[in-house]
Image: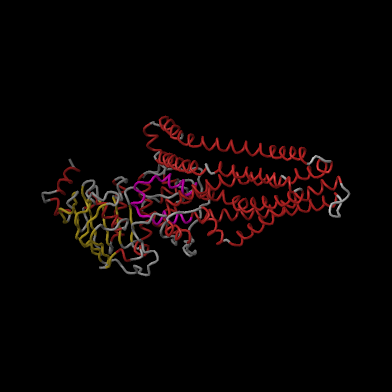
């Protein structure tokens, strides 16, 4: 037996993958954003913040209140500092000496510290919750999509939108809410503070700062188009990189590591190029902001000397005014951060929109009350024609009229492209017929809640699907309530129990992404164990034992034969030796549909396509 896989450092306890709980409450994502997307045909960052923010209104309102209060504290702090400076040159200001104003200023700073702590902790938690909500919505939409949606998509590009873009939005939210509210308030109150100190200087300072603010805004708006390009480029790059890592066996087998290193390095050139204009905008903005802090103060000093040159101005008013100017210029830095941040978040919102706006072709009737709660006694393909949505001009199944009865086994054979695997996809409702209908117990399969129907179906494909997790996670998938003893029994029947127990961590061994370290035979046995545990009424086998050696194949085939008793089984066959005992064989030809049908013994004696396939396989 094949025991090629050996795991020495991958216990499940180190990875801590949560096991599904069959009795846990089903997660129901918020659909307000999705409804708005369908209504407006776009997705705005502001909608995300407001809709999900209101869902967590306690956090959201706490942030809004604390930010507003902080803006008052910042403005009062600059005013109090100016009074401290004035009081050092005068006996008292509004009846308080300099140390009285100093005490008030310190108290203001303590309150500001507390508010800043609350603001940051609440805004970060709010941002994380919104990020998770948005990611769950994106995952939901991806899971709702039918198989055809993924036919021309790079998984890596979708993952960039799912993980990267939702993370960008989450990162921007935490500071965005604070700055959007605080910056205008601080500017307004800072301006009032300056007018309290000296209205003529305040007028000039306001003109300078507001003109500079407009310049910063206009400059920052250039970010939006540039960032959109960057997000599109990085999505393409990530898609390509993940595709190559997924094909690591091919890279290793062909010795193309250096080629891929060079190719992927070249692939990042557009990403670097897309960032160049952004770096120039960043550099210019920073230079403007640093220069403005000094330049505006120099303008104020010059105006004071030229027009208000007296002892009180130079020794009392001007130092206090310069100190208070901090409250007016500091928000410029926040504005310079807000606009690029909004641009990044807006670009990511558009990327996510591309995922969630797409409607699936199939409706799985997830909310339908029509549940399939009966035994599968009959399956009928009635006048079924099928063209793949990805290639609507190519007819795969021209016309299919067959009935499958309970307790019998059926095989579909034919050359590549004849449509035999399409039969299994229609039975699993990966696709709906282009014309005609598929009936289960004389009822259209499209009318059922799909999940309730698939609970009666078991599927073993030629390329087995292995998830990242241990043996229990993989065998129990779709039948989560199964006990460990039931998993062990299923693995024994699938002839893999001894192999699993030979691994250092046994059934708790992590199998790796896509079962990378498993042999083809081990993967197929695990999936067969999954089906044996599930014990379905309709069994669909797409060359289920193709990766097994002859001895093991016979042992597992006997277990499958036992499972197939009293059930309907559909076998997609490439090796004719695996279907000698089925009740009915359908021979398919591309563009013609079924050209022959009968038992193995009948067809082997009859001139035609089946005999040609048999002779070709034994020549």
Using residue 482 as the reference point, say whether residue 581 is left or right of it.
Answer: left
Using residue 351 as the reference point, say whether residue 94 is left or right of it.
Answer: right
Q: Position of residue 166 (x, y in %)?
A: 50, 50
In magenta stretch: residue 414: no
Prevailing SS of the magenta stretch = helix
Residue at x-position 17% and y-position 42% = 616
In magenta stretch: residue 141: yes
Q: Nearer the viewer, residue 548 or 309?
A: 309
Where 21 falls versus 147 (above or below)? below
Quadrant assignment, res 361:
bottom left
- Furthest residue toward left: 607
- Furthest residue toward front: 307
Magenta range: 136-164
Q: Position of residue 302 (x, y in %)?
A: 74, 37
Q: Position of residue 389 (x, y in %)?
A: 29, 52
Where 51 falls versus 553 (above or below)? below
Residue at x-position 75% and y-position 43% = 322
Image mark count: 0
Q: Position of residue 308 (x, y in %)?
A: 78, 41
Q: Nearer the viewer, residue 572 or 300?
A: 300
User: Which quarter of the rendering shows the C terminus?
Assistant: top left
The figure's colour scheme reads secondary structure
User: Which quarter of the rendering shows the N terminus?
Assistant: top left
């Amino acid at each position: 037996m094949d025991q090629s896989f050996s795991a020495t450092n991958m216990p499940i306890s180190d990875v801590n993958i949560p096991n599904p709980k069959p009795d846990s409450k089903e997660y129901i994502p918020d659909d307000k954003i999705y409804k708005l997307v369908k209504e407006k045909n776009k997705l705005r960052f502001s909608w995300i913040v407001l809709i999900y923010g209101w869902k967590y209104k306690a956090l959201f309102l706490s942030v809004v209140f604390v930010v507003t209060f902080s803006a008052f504290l910042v403005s009062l702090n600059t005013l109090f500092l100016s009074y401290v400076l004035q009081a050092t040159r005068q006996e008292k200001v509004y009846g308080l000496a300099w140390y009285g104003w100093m005490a008030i200023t310190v108290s203001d700073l303590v309150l500001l510290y507390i508010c800043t702590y609350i603001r940051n902790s609440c805004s970060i938690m709010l941002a994380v919750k919104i990020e998770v909500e948005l990611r769950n919505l994106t995952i939901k939409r991806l899971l709702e999509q039918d198989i055809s949606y993924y036919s021309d998509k790079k998984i890596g590009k979708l993952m960039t939108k799912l993980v990267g873009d939702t993370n960008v939005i989450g990162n921007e939210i935490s500071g965005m809410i604070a700055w959007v509210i605080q910056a205008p308030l601080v500017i307004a109150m800072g301006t009032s503070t300056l007018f309290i100190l000296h209205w003529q200087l305040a007028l000039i300072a306001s003109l300078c700062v507001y003109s500079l603010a407009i310049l910063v805004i206009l400059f920052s708006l250039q970010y939006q188009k540039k960032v959109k390009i960057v997000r599109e480029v990085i999505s393409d790059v990530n898609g390509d990189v993940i595709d190559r890592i997924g094909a690591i066996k091919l890279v290793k087998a062909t010795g193309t590591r250096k080629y891929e290193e060079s190719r992927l390095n070249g692939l990042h050139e557009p990403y670097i190029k897309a960032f160049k204009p952004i770096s120039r905008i960043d550099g210019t903005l920073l230079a403007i902001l640093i220069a403005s802090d000094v330049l505006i103060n120099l303008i104020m000093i010059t105006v004071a000397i030229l027009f208000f040159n007296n002892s009180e101005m130079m020794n009392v008013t001007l130092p206090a005014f310069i100190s208070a100017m901090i409250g007016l210029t500091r928000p410029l830095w926040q504005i310079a951060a807000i606009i690029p941040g909004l641009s990044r978040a807006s670009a990511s919102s558009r990327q996510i929109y591309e995922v969630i706006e797409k409607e699936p072709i199939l409706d799985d009737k997830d909310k339908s009350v029509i549940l399939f709660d009966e035994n599968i006694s009959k399956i009928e393909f009635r006048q079924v024609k099928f063209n793949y949505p990805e290639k609507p001009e190519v007819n795969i199944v021209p016309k299919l009229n067959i009935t499958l009865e309970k307790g019998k086994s059926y095989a579909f054979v034919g050359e590549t492209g004849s449509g035999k695997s399409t039969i299994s996809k229609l039975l699993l409702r990966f696709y709906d017929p282009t014309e005609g209908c598929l009936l289960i117990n004389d009822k259209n399969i499209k009318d059922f809640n799909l999940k309730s129907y698939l609970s009666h179906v078991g599927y073993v494909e030629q390329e087995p699907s292995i998830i990242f997790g241990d043996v229990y996670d993989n065998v129990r998938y779709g039948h989560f309530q199964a006990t460990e003893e039931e998993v062990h029994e299923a693995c024994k029947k699938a002839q893999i129990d001894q192999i699993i127990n030979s691994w250092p961590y046994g059934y708790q061994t992590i199998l790796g992404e896509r079962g990378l370290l498993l042999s083809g035979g081990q993967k197929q046995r695990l999936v067969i164990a999954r089906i044996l545990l599930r014990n379905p009424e309709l069994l669909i086998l797409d060359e289920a034992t193709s990766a097994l050696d002859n001895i093991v194949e016979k042992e597992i085939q006997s277990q499958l034969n036992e499972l197939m008793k009293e059930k309907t089984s559909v076998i997609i066959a490439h090796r004719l030796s695996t279907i000698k005992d089925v009740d009915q064989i359908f021979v398919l030809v591309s563009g013609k549909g079924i050209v022959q049908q009968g038992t193995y013994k009948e067809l082997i004696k009859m001139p035609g396509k089946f005999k040609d396939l048999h002779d070709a396989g034994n020549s």
